[in-house]
Amino acid sequence: VMLACHLDSFFGGANDDASGIAVLVGLKRALAAMPLTARKVDFWFVGLAGHHDEGAGMRAFAELNPSRMDDISTVILLEHLDMQPGTDSPVAPGTPPLNARRAAYTGPNGWPDIEEALPRLVAESGLISVAPPVVRECIADLFVVCDRVQAFSLMAAPPYYHTDHDTIDKLSEAGLQRAVDFHLRLLETAGFVDLPAETDQSSIR
């Protein structure tokens, strides 16, 4: 299972994609703290360059060693994972908060088990307040490999996406930890890990 984020950004890059980098590190720490018997698969933690250049980083990863892609069954893309409404981007009355405006991308063939579990996963993790719509297509770096792997990304484009408003005030430790917790629960639902009764809430610190 490949857990991936991109390292480059436009403008400030707080959500796009410092948030994904933080969650990648948090997942690595949480998974490393588990006993070996709790991890049912091998995990690759991958930072990609060239995200804003037609997926050049993912292309390079896939092409540099084609045989390793044969060993990867699932790619989970971590991007835009904490969104706090800032004073420069107010939320209109009656609309969901920025943190809840996301879609779950499950690749062109979908991922029925995960799609069915999404309302529970977001509720239990507290990541967002409403179940995200499911979009059965590829997005971002995933489009490079979606024809070869099961793919997933929970992503949204907030109002400050790709602008100089993408600043650190859009992030919070609590929101990033919720994103770590959501993805751990997703990995458990997919059968990749057995979570302990209580997850470590300090994994992103």
Image (cartoon, rainbow, N blue to C red):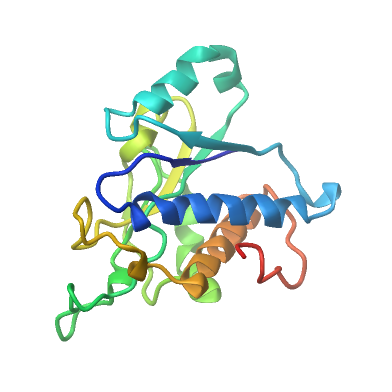
Write the residue at 48% across / 20% down.
62
Which percent across, then down, holds residue 174? 51, 74
Q: Nearer the viewer, residue 30 or 128?
A: 30
Camera-nearest residue between 198 and 188 = 198
Q: Is residue 115 above or below residue 126?
A: above
At 55% across and 13% down in the image, what residue appears? 65
Q: Residue furthest left?
A: 92
Q: Residue at x 28, y 35 (%)?
A: 52
102 lies above or below 87:
above
Q: Position of residue 180 (x, y in %)?
A: 56, 61
Task: Judge by depth and name the residue closer to the eye, 86 or 28.
Answer: 86
Quadrant where the image shows the N terminus: top right
x and y percentages locating residue 176 in the rendered image: 50, 65
Taking the view exactly as shown, the residue that stands out farthest to the bottom is 93
Residue 27 occupies quadrant: bottom right
Q: Measuring from the top left, give residue 15's x and y in whole percent.
A: 36, 57
Decide if residue 6 is in sight here. yes
Q: Quadrant of residue 128?
A: bottom left
In the image, is 111 to the left or to the right of 32?
A: left
Q: Is residue 78 above or below residue 100?
A: above
| Residue 147 seen in this snapshot | no
